[in-house]
């Protein structure tokens, strides 16, 4: 035996590159949470007692469950393989389902109830219950699809899965953010230059490039007057900070069972879309060198969505696009569990209203 042989490598729960991955994945999830706040308040008229007391805490639990499970999955597989370079699957709130359920299920239910002469509070409750039913339906489709997805994956060539994934990434994600970058060029282009220099130019800095970009962006936004201090808004959002633990809403779900059939035309396509999208992202991870079992990966996703619905949430979760990017940045396992704890903790503590005032 060679006495100088190196000991087998193994995974670590946190490496330096996880901070960059956390900033990227955390920003993705933060945007979805702020969208939930804006749409539920501005479009659906939900009171903070429902939104911050039930919907967001349920969302936070689903983010915790999924991200911690994917981190554990990656650590277990990496330990079995003797690897230290496995990157956990990214996970968060599904953007497409968020908009679909708000505008195609929850808002029509509320408007229909108001049109029938039902009071505002009762209409809001019916809308919320319809959202829970839609979320539960999506989770059941995702979880049950886990048992047949491997066959679908065998029939579909990798090019078919990844080409549609690339189109979604360019059309629905990259293009929108690029337009926002040019809408505020002083802040946007400066931050873009920092990202290009650190992530693509491999510029070495004392702190991660993603963290520097966020700090510089905040400084420029506040310094240029793009955002201003609003004492009334700060007081209002600060008053919402506090621990809000979710509780099971099974009775509300059962009462809303009649909402399932009328909205199957939205729930089934969204559930299948989430299932196929998650399958594409598992294929993307394998193309980047990280093979994950399809069944357990999709089951985690489905269970996270079901947990959200059971606790009063309305918005499904999904595997995110971007695993190869996080892997190239050096993110491994820590970015996943940190994202779950921070996003979940922020939802449970009501912190995101304050965060929205600080970060442009």
Image: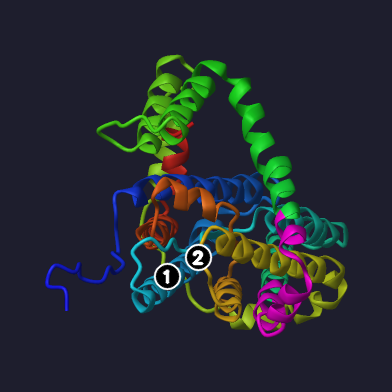
| Left or right of residue 192: residue 72 | left
The reply to whether the C-beta atoms of the residues labelled 1 and 2 are less than 8 Å apart is: yes
Quadrant in the picture for residue 42: top right
Q: Say whether residue 156 is magenta.
A: yes
Q: Residue furthest toward the front?
A: 1
Q: Name the residue that disc number 1 marks.
A: 74
The overriding secondary structure of the stretch rendered in magenta is helix
Q: Position of residue 102 (x, y in %)?
A: 73, 55
**Residue located 35% across and 59% down the image:** 334
Q: Say whether residue 65 is magenta.
A: no
Going from the N terminus, do you reach mark 1 or mark 2 first?
1
Position of 138 relative to 45 (above/below)? below
| Left or right of residue 54: residue 13 | left
Q: Position of residue 23 (x, y in %)?
A: 42, 45
| Left or right of residue 116: residue 176 | left
Q: Position of residue 79 (x, y in %)?
A: 34, 75
Q: Which residues are magenta?
A: 137-162
Q: Name the residue that disc number 2 marks.
A: 290
Residue 304 in sight here: yes
């Amino acid at each position: 035996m060679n006495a100088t042989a190196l000991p087998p490598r193994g995974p670590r729960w946190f490496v330096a590159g996880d901070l960059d991955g956390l900033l990227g994945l955390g920003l993705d999830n933060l945007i979805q949470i702020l969208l939930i706040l804006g749409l539920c308040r501005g479009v659906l008229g939900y009171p903070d007692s429902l939104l911050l007391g039930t919907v967001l805490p349920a969302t936070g639990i689903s983010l915790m469950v999924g991200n911690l499970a994917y981190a554990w999955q990656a650590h277990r597989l990496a330990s079995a393989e003797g690897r230290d370079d496995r990157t956990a699957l990214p996970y968060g709130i599904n953007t497409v389902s968020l908009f679909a359920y708000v505008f195609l299920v929850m808002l029509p239910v509320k408007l229909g109830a108001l049109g029938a002469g039902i009071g505002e509070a009762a209409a809001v409750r019916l809308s919320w219950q319809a959202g829970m039913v839609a979320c539960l339906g999506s989770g059941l489709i995702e979880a049950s699809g886990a048992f047949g997805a491997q066959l679908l994956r065998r029939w579909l060539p990798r090019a078919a899965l990844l080409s549609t994934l690339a189109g979604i990434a360019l059309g629905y994600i990259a293009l929108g953010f690029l337009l926002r970058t040019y809408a505020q060029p002083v802040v946007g282009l400066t931050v873009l230059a920092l990202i290009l220099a650190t992530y693509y130019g491999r510029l070495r800095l004392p702190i991660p490039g993603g963290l520097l970009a966020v700090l510089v962006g905040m400084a420029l936004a506040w310094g240029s007057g793009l955002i201003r201090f609003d004492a009334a808004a700060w007081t209002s959002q600060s008053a919402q900070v506090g621990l809000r633990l979710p509780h099971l809403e099974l009775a509300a779900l059962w009462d809303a069972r009649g909402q399932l059939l009328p909205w199957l035309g939205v729930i089934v396509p969204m559930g299948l879309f989430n299932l196929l999208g998650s399958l594409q992202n598992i294929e993307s991870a394998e193309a980047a060198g990280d093979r994950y079992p399809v069944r357990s990966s999709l089951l985690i996703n489905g269970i996270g969505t079901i947990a959200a619905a059971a606790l009063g949430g309305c918005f499904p979760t999904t595997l995110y696009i971007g695993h190869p990017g996080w892997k190239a940045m050096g993110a491994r396992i820590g970015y996943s569990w940190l994202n779950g704890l921070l996003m979940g903790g922020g939802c449970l503590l009501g912190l995101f209203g304050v965060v929205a005032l600080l970060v442009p």
